[in-house]
Amino acid sequence: MSLPLLEPTLSGPRIVPVLVLDDVRTAVPLAQALVAGGLTTLEVTMRTPAALACAEAIAAQVPGALVGLGTLTKPEHFAQARDAGARFLVSPGLTDCLAEAAKATGLPYLPGIATVSEALIAAEHGFRELKFFPAMLNGGAPALRGMVPLLPEIRFCPTGGIKAENVKEILSLPNVFALGGTWLTPADVVRDKRWGDIERLAREASALTV
Ligand code: 3PG
């Protein structure tokens, strides 16, 4: 049985802003600014109590956004994410229980891996799109390049420590379908509601992918 994939649903730049949102009132204007800057695939992390409400608000109120939920570390997170309107799911790692909960949602799921053995375990569960995390600590582009001949059927979305200067090299790899990170939404810029600056950062990132 093949599991649903995220890659075929992606449009536009293959860069996924990873969002840590404390306040549902900032979620919508932040997402609007990112979408206006060209970045339409957004990952809201379950690192704050407001995460589910923020994802739900973005899914309902920001046309053009493809919203996922990330940092899913408990089996119960998966149904909660689906019910909030998430279109894809992400975890920093993988366990048997998380794999089962992810499959039950019927949504594309990117489990996190950091080693070849972890990638093989994820593949045994049937997952072919994986989050390489934390990407830069684990060797960045050279490490991903080294996995091409070993894991020819696996496609990666690396995150963790990626900055604008890493984007071109990583996206040029044949086994990378997207990448993500928080560098597009600096905490002070979000706190001060400088949505024009967010849109500019998003537009600059989008330009790196053309
Ligand atoms: C993630 O969950 O994908 C990462 O924490 C994002 O990493 P970054 O903050 O280093 O971009």
Image (cartoon, rainbow, N blue to C red):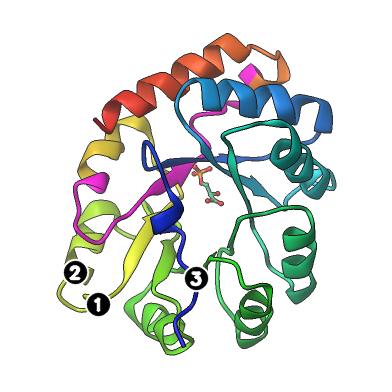
Q: Secondary structure at mark 1?
A: loop
The structure residue drawn at horizontal position 29% and vertical position 38%, both measured from the top left corner, is: 166
- Kindly identify the amino acid type of the residue bearing the numbered disc 3: Pro
Q: Disc 1 versus disc 3: distance between alpha carbons?
A: 19 Å
Mark 1, mark 3: which one is toward the viewer?
3
Q: Secondary structure at mark 3?
A: loop
Report whether residue 78 is seen.
yes
Q: Is residue 23 magenta?
A: no
The structure residue drawn at horizontal position 28% and vertical position 33%, both measured from the top left corner, is: 209
Neighbor class of circle 1 (other Cα within 10 Å; few <14, some 14-19, many 20+) is some
Image quadrant where residue 101 sits: bottom right
Q: Disc 1 versus disc 2: distance between alpha carbons?
A: 6 Å
The structure residue drawn at horizontal position 39% and vertical position 74%, both measured from the top left corner, is: 128
Residue 14 vs residue 87, the one in the foreground = 87
The residue where tag 1 is placed is 151
State the mark number for residue 34: none
The residue where tag 2 is placed is 148
Pointers 1 and 2 in contact (C-beta within 8 Å): yes
Quarter of the image for the C terminus: give it. top left
Q: Position of residue 94 (x, y in %)?
A: 56, 76
The residue where tag 3 is placed is 4
Q: Is residue 176 magenta?
A: yes
- Kindly identify the amino acid type of the residue bearing the numbered disc 1: Leu
Main secondary structure along the magenta-highlighted residues: loop
Q: Disc 3 versus disc 2: distance between alpha carbons?
A: 22 Å
